[in-house]
Image (cartoon, rainbow, N blue to C red):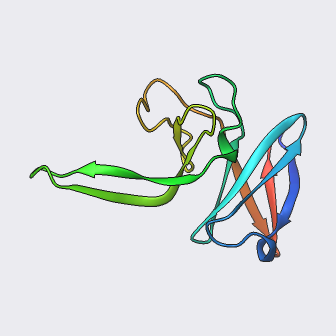
């Protein structure tokens, strides 16, 4: 990975499951999320009106099956921007309502010896 650098974020022990931390790295605010022991990085920036997307609450997805029954799935895998409620998939960065149109940048999170690093 030529041209990339790893930046220390926190330790695995300090980032509990379903929690996240926001760090400043190279003039960017990046949120690192722990989803069931897997780590994901997301830019703390809403593509709607530049709000702090990752400072909002974590949500899930309301899904309708072929019989019209609704179910709530993927609880805690979406972050809701506190400014206007836009929701983004923590794993992919895609907007929940319009995934083909809007996406927040994501970052690789690497775990080494109990430490978490974001790769830029």
Quadrant including the N terminus: top right
47 relative position to 21: left or right: left
Q: Quadrant of the C terminus?
A: top right
The residue drawn where x is 83% and y is 42% is 4
Q: Nearer the viewer, residue 11 or 22?
A: 22
Q: Position of residue 113 (x, y in %)?
A: 82, 75
Q: Is residue 46 above or below residue 1?
A: above
Eyeballing the image, is 75 above or below 16?
above
Residue 66, position in %: x, y? 12, 50
Whether residue 15 sits left or right of residue 80 in the image: it is right
Task: Indicate whether 17 appears above or below 109.
Answer: below
Residue 1 visible somewhere in the drawing: no
- Residue at (53%, 34%) from the top-left corner? 86
Left or right of 110 on screen, residue 26: right
Q: Please give the name of the residue rendered at 81% of the width and 58% of the height, measured from the top-left corner.
A: 117
Residue 114 falls in which quadrant of the image? bottom right
How far across and how far down the image is residue 36, in percent? 57, 71
């Amino acid at each position: 990975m030529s041209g990339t650098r790893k930046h220390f974020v926190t330790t695995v022990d300090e980032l509990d499951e379903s929690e996240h931390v926001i760090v400043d790295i190279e003039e960017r605010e990046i949120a690192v999320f722990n989803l069931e022991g897997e780590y994901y990085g997301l830019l703390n920036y809403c593509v709607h009106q530049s709000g702090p997307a990752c400072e909002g609450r974590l949500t899930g997805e309301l899904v309708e099956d072929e019989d019209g029954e609704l179910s709530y799935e993927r609880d805690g895998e979406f972050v809701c921007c506190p400014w206007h409620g836009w929701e983004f998939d923590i794993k992919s960065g895609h907007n929940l309502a319009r995934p083909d149109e809007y996406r927040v940048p994501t970052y690789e999170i690497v775990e080494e010896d109990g430490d978490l690093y974001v790769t830029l």
